[in-house]
Structure formats: C-alpha cells, structure tokens
Amino acid sequence: MSKTRFSTYVCLFFVCCFCCSKALPTKLNQEAVNNRPVIGILTQLVSDEVMKPFGRTYIPASYVKYIESGGSRVMPIKLTLTTAEYENIFKKINGLLLIGGAADLEASDFARVARTFYTLAVAANDAGDFFPIWGTCMGMQLLTVLVAGENLLTNTTAENIALPLNLTTEAGSSRMFASFPNELMKALTQEPLTGNFHHYGLTVKTFQENAKLQSFFSVLSTNVAENGAHFVSTLEGKRYPFYGVQWHPEVNRFQWNRKINFPHSVHAVQLSSLLAEFFVKEGRRSLHQFDNPEEDASLLIYNYTPVYAGNFTGYEQLYFF
C-alpha cells in the first residue's frame, strides 16, 4: 500500500505552546446558539469491488448516527460539485466531519473538496464566523496534510486493536475533554476505549519537528504502533475549532461485527457519546443556515436509505450516492 493510501476497518474500508489550549480568537462569537445545527459529512469514493454496484461514493451509517446522537442533523456532501456549490453549502452547514477510509490525501477528490472547506473554514473563523471541523482516522491525517502543506505520514500500523490513550499535559485543559468526568479521564488512560484501524499516521517526532503543525495544533494524546512508532492519536486546534482523532469514536456505539475489536464497555460508550455531543455543541455556535425549510429538507441525509452491508463489509450499514 502506498504512503497516500490508508487502512480501512480490517481492510474493509474503513486534528506546546499556548499557555491554555482552549484559546480561540477572541473575536469569535462565544455566545451564539443554533438549536437546529446541520453537520456536513464528506462522502468517500467507493474503491472496493463489492461496493461498486451500489454507488460511486458512500458514508458509513455509523458516522451519521454518531452525529445525530449528538443532537445534529446531517447533510451528505458529494465529491462532484463545483467550487461555487461548495462555497454555497459552506454558508448553510454548521460544521464538517471528515471520515475515515482510503484515499490519496493530496490528489483525490476527497482531498480536493476537503481542502476547499478547510480554506473556507480558516477564513471564516479569522473573520469571527465560527465553523468547526472534525477529522476521524484518515480525516485527521488529511487535516495534518492541509495544515503542514505536505504529506508527513509514515507507517504507524495499529490494525484492529483497541487502546487506552497516553494523555498529554494539554489534555487536561483542552476543549475536547473539558466536560469529561474524572472517572472517564482516568479510564481513558487505563482501558482500551479507542478502536484503531490504520496503517499510517503522524509520529510525535515528525510533529515536534514541523513548525506549522506545532503552531496550529495541541497534541492531546499519543499511542505506540505495532512497529514501535510513537504516533499522535488526538489533536486539537489552538486558535481554530479543528479536531482530529486517529481512532474511531463512532464505532463504540454503532459497529458490532464480532470479528473486529470495537470497544463496547460502559466507558467506551460514554466516550463516544460525550465526543459526539461536544462536536455538535461546537456546531451550535455556527449561525449558518439554509435559505428556507424546503431547501433544508431536500438536502439532508433523510432523503437516502442506508443499505445493510454487514454481510460483505465490516460496516453494519452504508449510505450510497
């Protein structure tokens, strides 16, 4: 597998220096509350032959359920639109989720569209227009590519394994973990609560040697790969509401394949729930909205029916487009 191709669930396809990592630009509207948020989820190109009869792109239903469980609606974002159309979508949604999967992180349509939204989000936040981004697994890897301006990923294989997190000193003052009870923070470091399904990642050494990444992100946790590589497993933006996890919080509640190490303990479920609520709460601070209820209704995930895929993939259900 090339450096720019990344793992899927068991080969089934499948974010320093500030005194306080909670710091965000003071001009952002901290009081904005949007009680009807919509989070956009960028679709992923179908690459596996058994999935191609169903559509060109897809979103695992676990990501949709994860965001909905946090109190948001979901808009699927296809990879075939124009830049002007993406700019229009950006004005309507309240956050973006970049999912895991397999794609070229520099030349694919997934990377191209993500770069468009990332650029819009940076400019918006700089102007006081709050807009969060979350990257899971490959989504986090892509965020590091976008920030660094190059692909710095290396082999950090942690395939089909649940791990505790090695939390850094920044974790305790982070926005991501701010609402976590002490018991859960302790469990994070002692219990295997995070499902890992990747072959590549960002090493701690590479992060520390890259000025762009160091100035942009705080490292909240690290882990050790099967080959001994020390890799970054959780990231949080210092000035921007951008977040990344190398692991998969959505699987803890919504993936059940017995052959795959999905964490389902009480603490694992609590972790997934609190992170979904956290990111949707971030989305509530965005006041973007659709022009009218009819447009809103026509573009949401409710217009699509998920396909049962547990008999030919590691996912329970998939949305195809």
Image (cartoon, grey):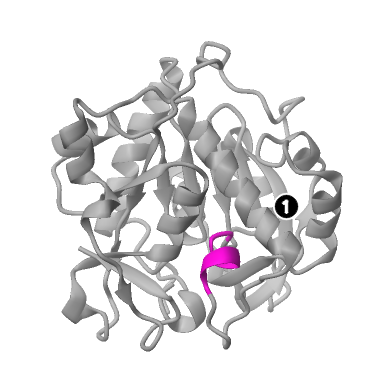
Q: Secondary structure at mark 1?
A: strand
Quarter of image, res 84: top left
Q: Is residue 46 above or below residue 216?
A: below
Q: Is residue 122 above or below residue 75?
A: above
Of the 4 image quadrants, the one containing the C terminus is bottom left
In the rendered image, residue 248 lying in the magenta stretch gets the answer no
* Amino acid type, callout 1: Ser
Single out the residue that lies furthest toward the top. 27
Place of residue 51 in the rendered image (x, y in percent of width and height, measured from the top left): 26, 80
| Residue ID at (27%, 59%) | 108
Q: Which residue is mark 1?
A: 221
- Nearer to the camera, 176 or 72: 72
Report the magenta residues as a range. 249-255
| Residue ID at (29%, 33%) | 90
| Residue ID at (53%, 82%) | 257
Place of residue 167 in the rendered image (x, y in percent of width and height, measured from the top left): 79, 51
Q: How many marks?
A: 1
In the rendered image, residue 253 lying in the magenta stretch gets the answer yes
Place of residue 296 in the rendered image (x, y in percent of width and height, measured from the top left): 23, 36
Place of residue 150 in the rendered image (x, y in percent of width and height, measured from the top left): 44, 50
| Residue ID at (57%, 82%) | 260
- Nearer to the camera, 311 or 51: 311
Q: Is residue 100 visible?
A: no
Of the 4 image quadrants, the one containing the N terminus is bottom left
Q: Is residue 75 left or right of residue 163?
A: left
Quarter of image, res 310: bottom left
- Nearer to the camera, 307 or 174: 307
Q: Is residue 241 left or right of residue 127?
A: right
Q: Is residue 247 visible?
A: yes
